[in-house]
Image (spheres, helix red, strand yellow):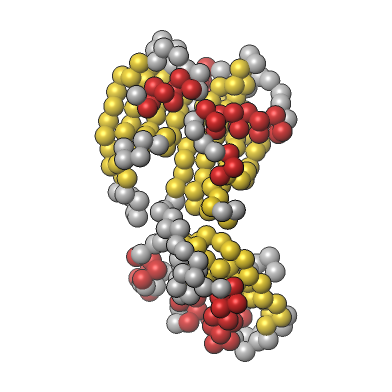
Amino acid sequence: NKALEIVNNLGYENQEITKIELNQNKEEYINEIYYKIETSDKNKNLNIKIDAETGELESFEDIGLLQKENNNEEINSEEAIEIVKSIYEDIGVNIDDYILKKCNKENIAYRGENKEVWNIESYKQYNGIVNPYEEINLKFIINSQKVKISSISFIKDGIYENNPAVITKEEAMEIATEKEKQLTNNNISEIKAERGIRKNNSLIYRLENNISSTNKEENQDVYLNDIKIRNVWLISINHTEKTEKKDLNARLKEKNKIYYIDISTGEIIGGEYNEES
């Protein structure tokens, strides 16, 4: 049994499955079928979610751990990372497929009390490119020199299509530059390109069509109804000079931007304002 295999690998012994439910998640653009499995003995109550089609772990929770026990041993971040690597190995995760996003000790509210836990977040990466919509969140404590897991969550904010690379960097830069020249006459001072993974959005569409409102009724377009996660070229375009225009749409068009250029089709699938430039 996959669920028992997982809990045994994590050091929970003599567990018995007390409940199995087959559920379906149809929220927004995610459609998944999963098993919700509960196990229990006199001291433990584990809640496990497993993808019904792939058999992969989606989440694990030791319900009530933080109610019964506290983090009572000091370790540093390097030691915490080594613990994470060991846990990942226990649940069949290749650490090389992930890049660390956060590793720190936090106080979280649990049933009216502040509880200290280690919170680690890791992004999935594909060929060295980070997917910011796919991550693992792991929380654990150390009590009486033993690592005790509070929860593990595999988070997927959409379906990554992993589309093939067809468009070159130079082609993507040309596409973004041409669009930027249509939006503003300001001289381009800098243009940079890097690979990325992004969701499509309506930013460039709104700028093209002078839509400054975020009201959905005024902003209906294909991007809001067909969310995708694609491999893209991230083309950063900066300007040295900006005019003091009173019109809101004109000011937005002059902002420094990052264009999302679909790496397979060359389509501009969205973008963001480059506030750091």
Q: Position of residue 20 (x, y in %)?
A: 29, 27
Horizontally, residue 179 falls left or right of residue 79, namely left
Residue at x-position 36% and y-position 71%: 222
Image: 115 above or below 212? above
Q: Estimate the x, y position of residue 73 in percent, counting from the top left.
A: 68, 20
Residue 6 at least partly seen = yes
**In the figure, is residue 252 to the left or right of 166?**
right
Q: Residue furthest bottom?
A: 185
User: As drawn, which residue projects farthest toward the top?
Assistant: 42
Residue 138 at x, y percent in the picture: 54, 34
Residue 28, how many percent across, how many down?
Answer: 34, 54
| Frontmost residue, 273 versus 193 | 193
Q: Residue at x 51, y 36 (%)?
A: 93
Residue at 40% across, 54% down: 159
Identity of the residue drawn at 58% across and 39% down: 95
Identify whether 256 is placed above or below 141.
below
Q: Nearer the viewer, residue 219 or 73?
A: 73
Q: Quadrant of the C terminus?
A: bottom right
Depth check: give the residue in front, 265 or 246: 265
